[in-house]
Amino acid sequence: MTVILGLEGTAWNLSAALVSEERVLSEMESTYEPKYGGIHPREAAQHHAAELKEVVSRALKGAEEKEAGFSLQDIDAIAFSQGPGMGPCLRTVATAARALALSLKIPLIGVNHCIAHIEIGRWRCGAKDPVVLYVSGANSQVLAYRAGRYRVLGETLDIGIGNALDKFARYLGLSHPGGPKIEERASRSTTYLHMPYVVKGMDLSFSGLTTAAKEAIEAHPDEQDAVCYSFQETAFAMLTEVTERAMAHCGNDELLLAGGVGANRRLQQMLRTMCEDRSGTFYVPENRFLKDNGSMIAYLGLLMLKSGVTTPLELSRVKPNYRPDEVEVTWRPEP
Ligand code: ATP
Ligand code: FE2
């Protein structure tokens, strides 16, 4: 059995997990909660630095295989999120990962956070070769695997859908993360107010929608629920349209949803309906594997290690703008 320790800390959530070929052995996390406003990258990094040792030792102790838990000596390799993400947060976690790999004399594996979201979803759902809708705070992309890489078929031209929801929520005085609070309010209304629907070819834009939603609140301060509903309906219809077109272009009837915004029930419902209309299959993992988690980092690390890929120290610098299509996929047989 190969055991990988995965460290995730691209943004507000610090997480450590142990994963083997068969399963997730344990996972622990510690979440940075800003006192006000959004995420302050340096404060989040300080949080990660202060909590890392504790989170790793809890993950080791929590592993069910052995009654006394695991020790660092039981680990075969260390995987960490190399990017994309916030520079200070990435650097904190990468420094810890390097120190652990060096002192234990085991391989280090820098993984792409976006691809980790995809691969854990494929693993948990048993999806073979799906089109992927990856929707999180900073990212909104439609991807498909072709000839050795995950190709980005469409994406946001400005902010990610999660950040759009979080920004609007902050405007309403709601705390971070805003997505679930907007979902709650949206579920209380069915009144649609006109919002800008911006799809350009296969790409999307959410910043005009966010501004329009703020203006709608100014114009109708008593209609918060209707504005939340209209925001969601518009944004999710845009995402569904582009995703459906990607599936049609690829001739692919499998869809996998990935990323924290994927927890939204209304988004899931729209995508499921679209897939049913095409006689396709819709896959979505449990919420704990949608949001940022250490297991996905460990799992992709395991796939990479088994395919012979590790990261030498000199190539382990963090990549805040790391794109999924930069990664050569060595662990998937050609379909
Ligand atoms: P990435 O680095 O991949 O962009 P991230 O740091 O944004 O990841 P995730 O956990 O993947 O982290 O996604 C967090 C986002 O998901 C936040 O913007 C949050 O508001 C949003 N979110 C969480 N739950 C829901 C929900 N039920 N509805 C809508 N958005 C949600
Ligand atoms: Fe993420």
Image: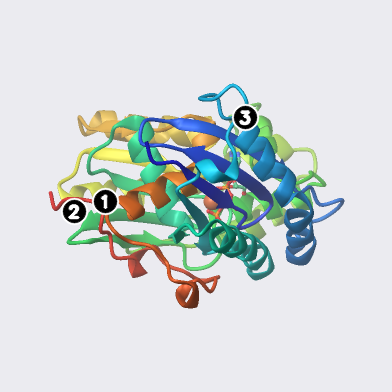
Front-most of residues 195 and 154:
154
Q: Where is residue 128 in the image (x, y as percent from the top left)?
A: 23, 39
Which structural element holds mark 3? helix
Q: Looking at the picture, does residue 318 appear above or below residue 36?
A: below
Q: Distance between the residues labelled 1 and 3?
A: 44 Å
Q: Is mark 3 within 8 Å of ligand 1?
A: no
Residue beneath the point at 43% across and 50% down: 116
Q: What residue type is labelled 2?
A: His
Q: What residue type is labelled 1?
A: Arg
Q: Position of residue 217 (x, y in %)?
A: 74, 49
Q: Which amino acid does label 3 sit on?
A: Gly
Which structural element holds mark 1? helix
Q: Do the residues labelled 2 and 1 touch (CB within 8 Å)?
A: yes
The colour style of the image is rainbow
Residue 204 located left or right of residue 207: left
State the residue position of label 2. 249
The quadrant the N terminus occupies is top left
